[in-house]
Image: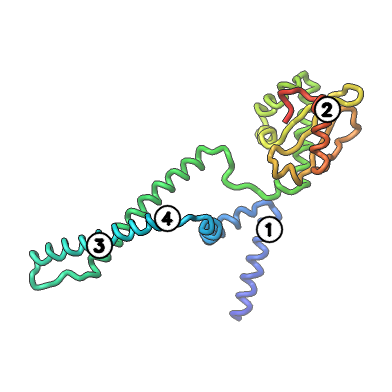
Amino acid sequence: MKAMKVVGWVLGTLFVMSFFICMGREWLIQVPLTLALGWVAFLLRVVPEMTWRWGAIAETVAVGAVLGVGTHLFLRRLWRQLRPEEAWPVCWSASLVALIVLLFGATMATVGIGHHVGWLVSSREPLAQSSWRFLPSRVRWENEELCAKAQELSKSGVSDARMVQVLLGDEDEKTRDRAERLYVVPWKGPGGEAGFLVFPRDPISRGWADAVRCGGGLAQDEVIKAAELPRLLSESQGQVAADTAP
């Protein structure tokens, strides 16, 4: 019966995790795992990059030794005046010094937590992001959506030079978010038709995510492979406004 309960809990947990992942809410799984085990990954990443200053370490050990010995001598003498029949234990002095060091470390940690909370609250970056937004198909879909929005604004009279500014000030939060993450570069088709080329601003994402070109006399949106994007941009420098070129 115990084995069946364990199997049931494991299967139930896997089902719940799969449900959250399929719904694009994998952060509900990542948050508790990060809180519980995130310090391990942090140490594995940071410790190899640390530079040990042995002089400062020696000074710290010396100051700690002087503090410990001085505290013990002072408290032993004070205790002897209060209770001559009893001796002040060394372990009490060591515990008191350790408590002082612990309080000092806790104070520094509290100040650091306060600073980080302030940065998180004031930052425009979301606390959690779905990894689905980094899938090639999702990036291409967002490119197409923003490209269609740019075409719509262009037909309504928005100039190429003001296109990015208008997109960044759009009422739709999704459009503003995409305009912050994606370049919108105007270009002209063979017959002078207005069109746009949309691709990620992030150089890393640009190395693997496809770009999208719309308008310019094209019957449908054209997908530009990431490897072809640098060549296309170099060929299009003369077809875009100087203040809109990436």
Query: Does residue 83 appear left or right of residue 33 in this picture?
Result: left
The residue pinned by badge 2 equals 195
The residue pinned by badge 3 equals 68
Identity of the amino acid at label 1? Phe
Q: Position of residue 156 (x, y in %)?
A: 78, 20
Asked if residue 25 can be seen in this view, the reply is yes
SS for callout 3: helix
Q: Nearer the viewer, mark 4 or mark 3?
A: 4
| Real-space Cα separation, disc 4 to disc 3, in angstroms | 23 Å
The residue pinned by badge 4 equals 53
| Real-space Cα separation, disc 2 to disc 1, in angstroms | 40 Å
Decide which of tag 4 and tag 2 comes sooner along the chain. 4
Q: Quadrant of residue 214?
A: top right
Decide which of tag 2 and tag 3 comes sooner along the chain. 3
Q: Which mark is residue 19?
A: 1
| Real-space Cα separation, disc 4 to disc 1, in angstroms | 49 Å
Q: Nearer the viewer, mark 2 or mark 1?
A: 2
Q: Is residue 17 above or below residue 134?
A: below
Q: Quadrant of residue 126?
A: top right
Q: Position of residue 157 (x, y in %)?
A: 77, 18
Residue located at (69% from left, 28% from top): 167
Identity of the amino acid at label 4? Arg
Whether pointer 1 and pointer 3 mark residues with C-beta atoms closer than 8 Å, the reply is no
